[in-house]
Amino acid sequence: MWEKDININEIKEIRTRTNVYFGVGAIEKINDISSDLKAKGINKLIVMSGRNAYKATGAWDVVEKALKTNAIEYINYDKVTPNPTNTAIDEAVKIARDFGAKAVIAIGGGSPTDAGKSVAILLEYKDKTANDLYEFKFTPEKAAPIIAINLTHGTGTETNRFAVATIVEKDYKPAIAYDCIYPMYAIDDPKLMTKLSEKQTKYVSIDAVNHVVEAATSKVASPYTVCLAHEVISMVAKYLPKALTNPEDLEARYYLAYAAMMGGVCFDNGLLHYTHALEHPLSAVKHELSHGLGLAILLPAVIENMWETKKETLTHILKPMAPSIRDTMNAKEAGDLVYEWLKSVGVPNKLKDEGFSENDIERLTELAFTTPSLDGLLSIAPTKATKEAVSEIYKKSL
């Protein structure tokens, strides 16, 4: 119970490649951040957000006051949706360029931050579009400063160099990773996360679990990623049920946010493979599908696929959520234990529940191999990622 020795109301500064202000009340650090931006000559910026959460959480009142106090003008693009699209990014970029924005503040979960990172790059490359960026037609080396104010405990994008967007006309959902899009500052304030719906509380936390399962088992995994994975899964297994029972439990939100942040660092180091490479086609085809839900559906079959190759690592990192797991059991038993944990937190879903059928498997498999960047994820999977293997994971997830 070492967690009891931590004062969750004391703001900690956690240094990764991003300076993260972490703790209950951390949103107030936007005053210091705004002052620093002003000192750097930044007097105009764009705020990227969804329609409601940035206001409903109370984040916007604090941010707006800080910007006005520091005489920083802003324009708000509040149309970012889950699974942000190339068209929305291009629309935001035009608004930001016309306004003269020199930085980006993203307020929300993974989608506003990923869209914000994309806008930050395109502000520096005025002849490029979101399609150019996500179809890898150029390699960015610079971006406008990014400040990420996180409203969920899942993606970890506030601490890493990744971003994702959907190219709607092609059903592509590629991922990019560039050093220039590490946020300059990030804020993780658990108080801003208490209004997450029950579903999103589950899905974003399951996203964090998938990040570390993949990062600990990829071909570029290290002792560091395995260590982080065990800790992240321990935190989620312990605190997700508490947050579901009492959404206002700040201690639970604090440690789920901590798990998500560590998950972001973990996959920044160990990268991702099967579940993300296979989920991106799912939510590219069905934009309304929550990313975390898609990952949850795929996870048991992915565990089964890589069990024989990585069972010692998987036994170690999964034990907090599946205490009876043993490296002597077979792959199906291991996958079933993970599915039982998912059911225990209220996520028993299968692909058929989300409108997919066997008729979709060929198209989904093709997208997993043809979507820009996903072949790179599959190339570092711990087992040989053939089309047959990918198809089998989809089939077992139906």
Image (cartoon, rainbow, N blue to C red):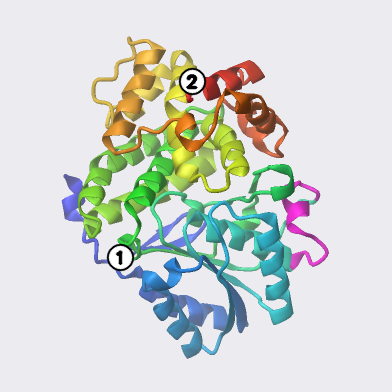
Residue 240 in the image, given as x and y percentages of width and height = 28, 45
The residue shown at (73%, 71%) is: 94
Which residue is located at x 78 percent, y 53 percent? 132
Q: Position of residue 161 (x, y in %)?
A: 58, 51
Q: Is residue 248 above or below residue 226?
A: below
Q: Which residues are magenta?
A: 124-137
Location of residue 183 by image quarter: bottom right
Q: Position of residue 225 (x, y in %)?
A: 44, 36
Residue 318 is a magenta residue: no
Which residue shows up at 25% across the image and 51% down it? 243
Residue 56 position within the rendered picture, expressed as x and y whole percent measured from the top left: 38, 71
Looking at this view, is 169 or 222 the one in front? 169
User: Which numbered tag is attached to residue 191?
Assistant: 1
Secondary structure of residue under mark 2: helix
Camera-side mark, 2 or 1: 2
Which label is found at residue 396? 2
Please tell me whether residue 30 is drawn above or below residue 153 in the rendered image.
below
